[in-house]
Amino acid sequence: MNNYLFTIGVGVSDRPSRWQGICTIYGHLARGLTRMGHRCRFIVNPAAFDARALAGLDAAPGSHADVETALAEDAWHNGFIWGGRIAPDAETAALFATGNVPVIYSELGWFPQKGTVYFDRLGTNSQMSFDTPPPLVGLRRLQFAIARRRACRTIYGQRFGGPARPATARQQVFVPLQDETDTNITQDSPFPDMDSLLRFLSETYPDCHFTARPHPKAAPSDLSSYPNVTLQDPKANPYAELKTFDAVVGINSTMLSEAAFMGHDVVCFGNGIAKIYGIARHADPATPPARLQGPENRDQADAALAHLFLDRQLRQKRLSSPRYLQGTYLKQMLDL
């Protein structure tokens, strides 16, 4: 029997209720582990505690002091941290390190984010580990091709692939803007804010037309007006018109990975999953590419997308199934 200690938003003071949904995700996994004979315990930020999602589990509101006490009372096989990129998470990780407890980090998946999750020993987003994708050949290539096209229709409501326009035509480019307070921007972006990104794109690519979509929950209020930039209504379905664009360009938004999955040319200027796995062309603002195009090695990008879609991201609700867990990388990661 292994002991697993789940922490959710411990020590977070900035809108900790945002972590409440994690109780459901970790609750699924804990039930699966419990059914396999393992022991799970939860320490949750009081403002994020969801009694219904954690019903029947050993769970209680708590603080870093409670984590420290739990580490002193029992031997733990792994400790879980959601995200891991803010100061309170670093404090939790330090406590686990003091107790020689290996940390498992987790975050929402990609295709789509809703309903999926991934786990990693090193971290999430730009801090996640890179594991070489299996070759995309034979049956695996066929399996991914079918699943990819089906997912484009059922998840995004769009066909696979971008528009077919002459290379000489004016590029129509979609730009998903991001929450400027998010760690993806504060830690992994060459641009301090969204207006800086739009100014750079407008001035660097005057022959392109950019359609920028403000983040629906964190739309910047100080965006300037640029002659070749149009703002999309943040309440609009971002996928409805995506097939009309020649390329998708941004910093490190999840939408970049989704666009690559849907077969679009994608360029990223920040650090994140798209850069780590090569599913987008990573560009340096100091030496921008002449034309906004996707990665040079398409086969490598497709192999990475297949790996992320078929292997790395897991279905949240199925985590409660021991049989499902045994067929995923969690079997080895958690020594199940």
Image: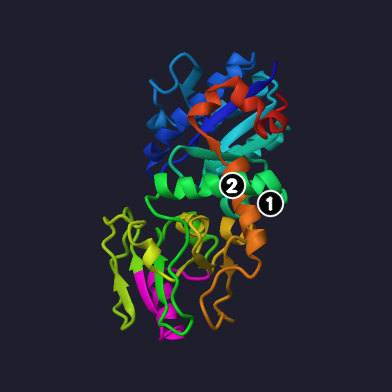
* Picture residue at 32% right of the left edge, 64% below the top: 220
Position of residue 6 relative to residue 179, above or below, is above
Q: Residues within 10 Å of mark 1 (few under 14, many from 20)?
A: some
- State how far apart marks 2 and 1 are (Cα): 8 Å
Position of residue 319 relative to residue 209, above or below, is above
Q: What's the amino acid at mark 1?
A: Leu
Q: Give the left or right position of residue 76, taking residue 149 as reference.
A: right
Q: How is the image coloured?
A: rainbow
- Which quadrant does the C terminus fall into? top right
Q: Is residue 14 magenta?
A: no
Looking at the image, tell me whether mark 2 or mark 1 is earlier in sequence order. 1
Residue carrying label 1? 136
Q: Residues within 10 Å of mark 2 (few under 14, many from 20)?
A: many
Indicate the secondary structure of the residue bearing disc 1: loop
Residue carrying label 2? 144
Labels 2 and 1 touching (C-beta < 8 A): yes
- Which quadrant does the N terminus fall into? top right
Q: Give the left or right position of residue 4, taking residue 111 as reference.
A: right
Indicate the secondary structure of the residue bearing disc 2: helix
Of the pair 118 and 209, the residue shown nearer to us: 209
Residue 90 visible somewhere in the drawing = no
Residue 167 in picture, x, y percent from top left: 49, 81
Residue 150 in picture, x, y percent from top left: 47, 45
Tell me where the magenta segment starts and ends, as one range: 190-211
* Picture residue at 39% right of the left edge, 63% below the top: 243
Position of residue 263 relative to residue 284, above or below, is above
Looking at the rendering, which quadrant does residue 52 occupy? top left
Of the pair 92 and 57, the residue shown nearer to us: 57
Residue 53 visible somewhere in the drawing = yes
Q: What's the amino acid at mark 2?
A: Phe
Residue 59 in picture, x, y percent from top left: 49, 20
The mark found on residue 52 in the picture is none
